[in-house]
């Protein structure tokens, strides 16, 4: 019987607040049997090459049900998508621009915002996995696209490599209302919100009549219990401006995943969308560090673990 040693992270304790630490997530070594009779009927053994590290993982280890947006993982649920490894697209793209983040960008921009050429589009966390794709999709639609992100290096990246018309560093331009007045003299037609809190509030002061605000994520609140998060005090703007603000989960659009993947593969092959900027951590043991990096501005690009 062939046995192999495998390492896995397990949840030792819930982390109600703050960035999870080694008190909450622990690495252990387990022995796996690879003999054919140890594999149940209609099951396969997969070797993990890359792991996508995503903000939603944080919300599944809080031990609370207080309005965080992701439900707990269901037991025994598994999705495996077959891809052609020889089609010229690097494998990590299948967990970035052709994976959940790219799909979230596509649902938010293509399906929900559906912007017209010339629309003024604002995207927060613009240098992240969703933001990189969303900005490029909006540019393909002929929009004027502005992003906010957490460092000057990322501001440069999204302008030079991902086609953003302009961008600002929210750590240095800390008066968001003033920044949005400067970057959106004609108001905001679409705001793809990835961060929530103060930035969402500021954006709602600049929306145009019939603006669309797809709510993709609110990462500024993920490490806080809901009573500690910044509130949005100006929802009245939604009424007077007749704004359509809509939360969404990619899981509700799986019936469109095939359309998305075909379109995105074509964009990548034609160079209409650039390959993702990746922040690659090496080895499964880096999971905790890589997860924590999502909550600082230290990571540039899509966070991925290369397992071997
Ligand atoms: P990401 O942007 O690659 O990484 C997270 C980024 O968020 C960080 O790099 C950081 O960048 C920024 N950030 C962290 N803390 C922040 C804070 N307090 N205030 C403002 N920005 C902060 O992550 P992603 O995978 O692309 O996800 C982006 C958003 O989309 C997340 O909110 C995620 O939950 C959401 N999402 C939703 C769906 C869905 O189905 N609805 C699917 C996928 C992702 P900077 O600070 O440097 O800008």
Image (cartoon, rainbow, N blue to C red):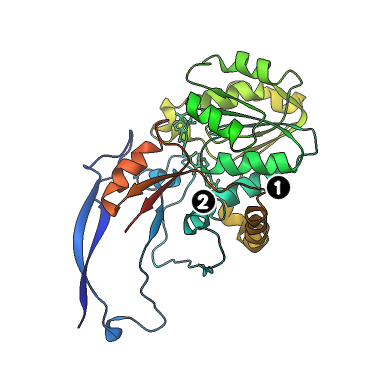
Q: Provide the residue designation for mark 1.
A: 110
The secondary element bearing badge 1 is classed as helix
Mark closest to the chain's N terminus, 1 or 2:
2
Residue in the picture at 57% in, 66% down: 87
In the rendered image, residue 75, in percent from the top left (x then y), is placed at: 39, 64
Query: Would you say 187 lies left or right of 35 here?
Result: right
Q: Residue 291 vs residue 186: left or right?
A: left
* Disc 1 CB within 8 Å of nearest ligand 1 atom: no
> Which mark is on residue 171?
none
**Considering depth in this image, is 196 or 121 the residue closer to the camera?**
121
Q: Quick one: label 1, few (<14), some, or many (20+) residues within 10 Å?
A: some
Residue 72 placed where, x, y %? Answer: 41, 53
Mark 1 or 2: the one toward you: 2
Q: Quadrant of residue 160?
A: top right
Report whether residue 217 is seen: yes
Mark 2 and ligand 1: say if the CB distance to the nearest ligand atom is below 8 Å: no
Residue 251 falls left or right of residue 28: right
- Quarter of the figure with the C terminus: bottom left
Q: Residue at x 75, y 42 (%)?
A: 141
């Amino acid at each position: 019987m062939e046995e192999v040693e495998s390492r896995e992270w397990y949840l030792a304790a819930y982390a109600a607040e703050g960035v999870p630490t080694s008190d909450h997530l622990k690495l252990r070594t387990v022995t796996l049997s690879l003999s054919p009779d140890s594999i149940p009927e209609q099951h396969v053994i997969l070797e993990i090459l890359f792991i996508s590290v995503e903000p939603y993982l944080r919300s599944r280890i809080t031990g609370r049900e207080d309005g965080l947006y992701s439900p707990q993982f269901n037991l025994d649920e598994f999705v495996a998508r077959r891809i052609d490894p020889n089609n010229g697209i690097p494998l990590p793209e299948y967990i970035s621009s052709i994976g959940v983040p790219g799909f979230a960008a596509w649902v938010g921009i293509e399906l929900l915002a559906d912007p017209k050429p010339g629309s003024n589009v604002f995207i927060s966390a613009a240098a992240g996995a969703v933001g990189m794709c969303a900005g490029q999709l909006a540019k393909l639609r002929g929009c004027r696209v502005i992003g906010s992100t957490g460092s000057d290096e990322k501001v440069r990246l999204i302008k030079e490599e991902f086609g953003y018309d302009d961008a600002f560093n929210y750590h240095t331009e800390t008066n968001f209302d003033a920044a949005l007045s400067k970057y959106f003299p004609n108001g905001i037609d679409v705001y793809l919100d990835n961060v929530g809190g103060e930035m969402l509030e500021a954006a709602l002061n600049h929306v145009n009549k019939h603006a669309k605000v797809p709510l993709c994520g609110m990462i500024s609140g993920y490490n806080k219990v809901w009573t500690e998060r910044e509130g949005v005090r100006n929802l009245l703007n939604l009424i007077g401006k007749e704004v359509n603000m809509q939360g969404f989960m990619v899981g509700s659009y799986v019936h469109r995943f095939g359309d998305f993947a075909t379109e995105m593969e074509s964009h990548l092959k034609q160079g209409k969308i650039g390959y993702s900027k990746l922040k690659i951590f090496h080895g499964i043991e880096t999971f905790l560090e890589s997860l924590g990096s999502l909550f600082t501005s230290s990571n540039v690009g899509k966070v991925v673990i290369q397992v071997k």
